Amino acid sequence: METLTDKLICEWRDFSTDTENYTQDMFEELVGDEFDAMMFEHANDEIPAFIWTANYVCIIKRSTRMINDISITKIPRNPACD
């Protein structure tokens, strides 16, 4: 049985779409923040579902219309509420 800790990894794992190869350096430059961890929905997934950085949780959504691609949504990890 898979658990959350089976899917959550704290070391970067390169992944690819039809248009891009995502390395840690490239991803950090793209989102403007440092990588912390990534989570895959299933153990055999090649593309993570979530990536945590120092300041954001990035939701990775797959899109497969004509080509296999992703979109990245950044959500602040610790929003400051007044």
Image (tube, rainbow, N blue to C red):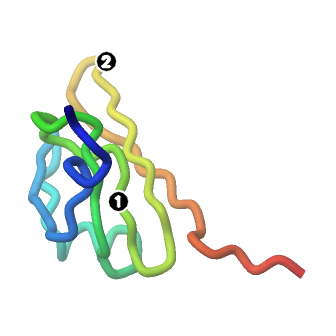
Say which quarter of the image contains residue 78. bottom right
Amino acid carrying label 1: it is Ile
Q: Nearer the viewer, residue 56 or 32?
A: 56
The residue at 23%/48% (across/down) is 7
* Element under disc 1: strand
The residue at 16%/49% (across/down) is 20
Q: Nearer the viewer, residue 47 or 18?
A: 47
**Disc nearest the viewer among 1 and 2:** 1
For label 1, the residue is 51
Decide: is 42 above or below 23: above
Q: Position of residue 36 (x, y in %)?
A: 31, 75
Say which quarter of the image contains residue 1. top left
Q: Does residue 54 appear to the left or right of 81 in the view shown?
A: left
For label 2, the residue is 65
Res. 18 visible in picture: no
Q: Residue furthest top?
A: 65
The residue at 44%/49% (across/down) is 59
